[in-house]
Amino acid sequence: MAAVDTDTPRDAATAQESIFRRNLHSFAANRLALGSAIVVLLFILMAVFAPLVAPHDPAETDLFRRLQPPAWMPGGEWSYLLGCDALGRDILSRIIYGARISIFIGAAVVLVATTIGIIAGLAAGYLRGWVDTVISRVVDILLGFPYLIFAIGLMAMMGPGLINIILALVYKEWVIPCRVVRGETLATRELEYVEAARALGAPGRHIMLREILPNILSPVIVVSTIRMAHVIILEASLSFLGLGVQPPTASWGAMVADGRAFILQAWWVSTFPGVAILLLVLAINVASQGLRDAFDPRFHE
Amino acid sequence: MSLARLIERLLQLVPVLLGVSVIVFVMITLTPGDPVEIMIGDQVVTPELEAAMRHDLGLDRPVHERFFVFLGNAVQGDFGESFYHRRPVIDVIAERLPATIELSLVALLIALATAIPLGVLAAIKRNSVLDRLATVGSLLGVSLPGFWFGILLLMLFAVHLQLLPVSGRIGFSSEIEPITHFLLIDTLLRGRPDAFLDALSHIVLPAITLGLPMTAILMRVTRTSMLEVMRQDYVTFAEAKGLARHRVLFRHALKNALIPTVSVAAIETGSLLGGNMIVETVFGWPGLGRLVVESIFVRNYPLVQAAVLFYAVTYVMLNFVADILYTVLNPRVKL
């Protein structure tokens, strides 16, 4: 902390950075949040390097290993640590590859939705008038649908597939960052420095992107990370219902669904992919709470 | 709140509901697969007959006309025929609805009954072990994927311990002549306590699964607002007056602390609608959610669309009720 405070903020940019660094320090001081962020990072690394990490080919079937139990149970093998599914595929390898789907879809949806939400929210909050009316109406209408039902309806319409899942979720997801950005923009646009920029004759686009956006980015990033956990559960739910990525691609939700038929004789098929979802979502939730506490000034004690 | 305000708020719903129906209509129109071809299936028909079917369904008219026909029919509850059941969609939905409503209400009840006492206790005994457990529990509650939690409950209570049934709404031998179509009520009305217990044993696991995220959220809200209220002057004053602490907490603080809980509960009731699809699928619950999921796979689109519209309208109305409830409970808020 002390090292940061000794920085003399010469201009706005360094002042901004030192606040950022101070926030980063207070995030790092939160052990639980930091640990969770590391867990999330490990999941990401696991997904990226899946071919190197996975002990087996996730699609390789072996009927002699049909429903083979985990290693520590009788009949298990250490090279198939978490056992095998009904087609004799290695569950651990499928979980490792499944992380790619969950993380890719989660990140893609949140990234695209946040970008759209920022543009729409800035336009609505700064320009006001009919732009605000139109955007706010669309937001109200989209909020009229329960999320999962909206996504299910779209998936029924568009058919399964990776891009379609991302689209189906983005169509509604952008509303959430949009509302945050709109609210923050409304509050910021009346501040003196924005008025000063206006008085100097800066064009609207410059004010929105260079003056307002950098100052409202913190809450937007915090909301986005929290949303990522929701999106991962939604994707898993769609996959569970059979509306997600199609087999043989491994996805956690579909793996849990596959195991449903075998809960009498092979509990491990459904259980382990679910543990993976829980761990990742929990880690994201805890880490993003830490982020919120550190980066959102309203939570500073 | 004045009547004029209420009417104004109701009128504000009109554009939202209209927009919602436009979106549902666009979903219908863009859905791949021609309804006439789906209805014909493998049968051989003449082009004339096909054209006649198309005319009957109004598919030969321009899009905007079709939208108003759709809207007019929807208002009258006419959503066409379910391809699969060969019966009006609205009848099929009405048949499945009581099971879904019953499940949602029990889930709501379980959530309220656990979340409020736990939230209040966590606030009163702040930073105690119980408070920490409640915090961890509520974090777990929002992080658990519902479908997986349901399967875990099934494996533990139905398969391993064999205490509860695996699926369905009631056992074969307990089936009774329906009155209200809510089995927990009907079994009692018919004087069949054994059947009531049977229905209860069927609903417990799905209702817990459905209510879990809501419990987590409500617990957090109750705890926060209780802490907030306990800091207020009038609570301090009541304590200073020498009133017993539990009396202050339960007569003064709790009543006000529950205002946010009730409003959030009303909003979250809407989110139960989405959870229903998952939970009904896991537990083979014969409700609307499972029907919708099944309908997607047999390409029974009229039903899917009617259900999506129905869910959306219900959701909008529930949020409206939540708004009104919040204002009525909290007179300081002006709409």
Image (tube, rainbow, N blue to C red):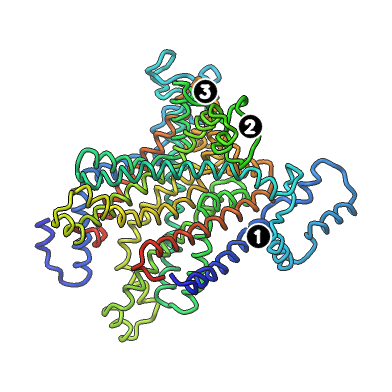
What residue is shown with label 1? B25
Same chain check for tags 1 and 2: yes
| Disc 1, SS | helix
Q: Position of residue A243 (x, y in %)?
A: 57, 43
In the picture shown, does residue B188 fall above or below B223? above
* Residue A218 vs residue B176, the one in the foreground: B176
- Amino acid at the residue labelled 1: Phe
- Amino acid at the residue labelled 3: Gly
- Please identify the quarter of the rendering in which residue A32 is found: top left
Same chain check for tags 1 and 3: no
| Disc 3, SS | loop
Q: Position of residue B23 (x, y in %)?
A: 60, 61
Q: Chain of mark 3?
A: A
What residue is shown with label 2? B176
Spatial CA distance of label 1 from label 3 is: 44 Å
In the picture shown, does residue B94 fall above or below A187? above
Q: Which quadrant would the C terminus of chain A be assigned to in this image? A: bottom left
User: Is A271 situated left or right of B296 in this image?
Assistant: left
What residue is shown with label 3? A88
User: Is B199 situated left or right of B75 in this image?
Assistant: left
Closer to the eye: label 1 or 2: 2
User: Is A94 situated left or right of A220 in this image?
Assistant: right
Q: Residue furthest top?
A: A74
User: Is B57 situated left or right of A16 in this image?
Assistant: right
Question: Which residue is painted at 59% across and 51% down in the image?
Answer: A153
Q: Are marks 1 and 2 in contact (CB under 8 Å)?
A: no
- Amino acid at the residue labelled 2: Ile
Q: Position of residue A147 (x, y in %)?
A: 50, 52
